[in-house]
Amino acid sequence: MPGRGDSHIAQLHDLGQSPWFDYISRELIGRGGLKRMVDRDGLGGVTSNQAIFEKALRSGSAYDEQILTLARQGVSSSEIVDRIAIEDVRAACDVLAPVYMRSGGEDGFVSIEVSPAYAYDPAKTVSEAERLFTAVDRPNAMIKIPGTREGVPAILESLRNGLNINVTLLFSLTQYEAVAEAYLDALEYRLQHDLTIRAVSSVASFFVSRVDTLVDELLEARMEDAVATDRRRLAELKGRAGVANSKIVYERFRTYLNSRPWQLIAASGAKVQRILWASTGTKDPAYSDVLYVDELIGEHTINTLTEATWKAFKDHGAVQRTVDRHLEEAHRTLRGLSHLGIDMERVGAQLQTEGVDLFMESFEATVANVDRKRQDLLAGAGA
C-alpha cells in the first residue's frame, strides 16, 4: 500500500491513516483523475452524498446523454438521480478495486448514501441499504446510513446482513458509542450464526468542522455580554471544540480496541471499525486550512478530504501522529465549554438533526436540477 513518492497525502498511510476523497463525478473517473490519485497519492477510498452529486451534475455535460436517454424512456427525475449515483459509485469501486484487493479488504471503499428521507425509518433504511448494495454489485461498496437514534437499529440489521456500512452524521461521544456497540453486536451475531465476519467492514464518520462552527457561534453569543476578562477566556476556546471533541472520541475508540470482547472477536478475523474524520474542510478562514487533518492523524483512522483540503495538505500538511496528543488539553477544553453551559451532547444532537435536513435539501435540489436538465434536453432534442 502507499507511502508513494514524496506526497504528504500518501505518507499518511505510514501512520495508519487512510486518505479518502470527499467527491465523485463521472468526469473525475472517466478522465483518469481518480486513478491518478490512487497511483500518485495513495487514495484509499471515496465518499459521496447528495450535495456532491448535485455539484457534479451542475458541472459540465457529462451526464446529459444518460439523462436524455432515461428521460425518453419516461424515467422520473428522482430515479435518474438514483441511477446516476449507482453508476458512478460502481465505476469508482472498479478504480479502487486494486486498493481493496491489496489491503485484504481493509480499504478501497466507495460510499453511497441511503436517501435521507429514511433517516428516521429503520425498516425502510434496511431495505434501501440492501437495494443499493445489490445494485452497485461490488464488494467494496459501502452504504452510508445516518447514525440517528432510529438509524442505529438499521445499522445493526444491515451489518448483521453482511453489508459494509459507513455510519454518517456522528457528532458526539454518545452517538459514537451507540454505533461502536452496534458493530460489535452485529459481528457477535454473525459468529453465533456461523456467518463470516471477514468480509464485513464499517467506518464511523465523525464530523469535525461543523462542531466548531456551532460552538463558535455559542461562544460569540456569550462574549457579547461578558466582561473583558471573560471575553478573553471565551475567545481562547474558539476553534478548539471540533478537534477536542474528536480526540475524546478517538480515546474512547482505543478503549474498545483494548477491551476483552473486541480482542476475542478480532481473533476470529473481525476488521476494526475505523474512525472516519468527516467535514474536515476548514470553514473559518481564521483557522489553518489543514487544521482538521494536521490534528487528527493516527492509527485506524480515515480522513475524507475535499478537493481544496486535499491540495492544501499536499502542499503544506504536517505528517505526524497527533490524534492522541494533548488529550488532557482536549478534556480541559470540553470541561471549559461545559462550565459555560455548552453541552457537547446537545450540540451533537442539534448538528445531527441539521445534518439530516441538509442532506434532504441537497437531495431535493439534485432532483430539481435533473428535472430542469431533463426538460431542457428533451426540448432540445425535439422529443
Image (cartoon, grey):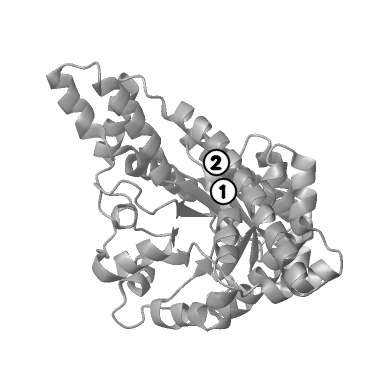
Tell me residue 134's x, y (percent).
78, 65
| Image vertical order of residue 213 relative to residue 90, above or below | above
Q: Secondary structure at mark 2?
A: helix
Q: Are marks 1 and 2 in contact (CB under 8 Å)?
A: yes
Q: In this orientation, which residue lies closer to the viewer: 77 or 164?
A: 77
Tell me residue 318's x, y (percent).
24, 63
The disc label shown at residue 168, or none: 1
Q: Which residue is mark 2?
A: 355
| Image vertical order of residue 120 relative to residue 363, above or below | above
Q: Amino acid at mark 2?
A: Gly
Tell me residue 266's x, y (percent).
57, 58
Q: Is residue 158 left or right of residue 245?
A: right
Q: Amino acid at mark 1?
A: Thr
Q: Quarter holding the C terminus?
A: bottom right
Q: Is residue 273 left or right of residue 17?
A: right
Q: Quarter holding the N terminus?
A: bottom left
| Quadrant in the rendering for residue 330 | top left
Tell me residue 232's x, y (percent).
15, 27
